[in-house]
Amino acid sequence: MTDRDDGFIADDKRPLIPEGEYRAQCIELRVIRYFDSQRMRLWFKIIEGQYTDTLLEMFLNLMDGKTGSRFKSVPPASNYYKNWCIANYCKQPGRRDRMSPKIFLNGIFKVKVRNATPKYPNSRERMPDGMQYSVVAYLIRREQ
C-alpha cells in the first residue's frame, strides 16, 4: 500500500490591500448563479500605485429582492443601476433604455475598495483576520 495525498490544491489567495480609492480598469465580467440568485461578477485591475496589477472583484445583484426573480426593469435604487450610471459618465438611462453590462468592460474608473470580513454560517461572529480580503465596493467615477 502506498501513502498518497488525496488533498486538494489551494487556489490563489484573495488579495488584501488597504481600504481606499484606487484607479482600476474593468477587465472582465460574467453573470453567475449564486445559490438561488444571479449576480454580475466584475474583475478590476488596479492600474497605478503600489498595488498595480492587483485583481479585485465586485459583485452586483441582478435579482429583485421582493419577487426573487431577475430584474425585468432595473430599479434606480439597485446597485447595478447606480454603478451603471457612473459607468455611463453619470448619465441616467431614458425610460425603457437598455442597460447593457458591456458599458463596464475596459472602462477606467476611480473605485472605492473595502475589506470584507466573512462571518461564520448562521452567526454574527466574524472569522479570523486571516480570512479578510479586498473587494471593489462601488465606482466613484469613470475616468476613461
Image (cartoon, rainbow, N blue to C red):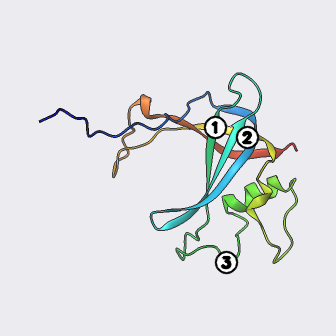
Identify the residue at image location x=69%, y=60%. 80
The front one of 27 and 89 is: 27
Identify the residue at image location x=70%, y=75%. 73
| Mark pair 1, 3: CA separation | 31 Å
Furthest-top residue in this view: 50
Q: Amino acid at mark 1?
A: Leu
Marks 2 and 1 close (CB-CB < 8 Å): no
Sequence-earlier tag: 1 or 3: 1
* SS class, disc 1: strand
Q: Amino acid at mark 3?
A: Lys
Q: Which residue is mark 1?
A: 55
Q: Which residue is mark 2?
A: 111
Q: Amino acid at mark 2?
A: Val
The front one of 139 and 56 is: 56
Residue 108, compared with residue 94, is above or below; it is: above
| Mark pair 2, 1: CA separation | 13 Å
Identify the residue at image location x=65%, y=32%. 54
Residue 21 appears at what percent x and percent y?
73, 33
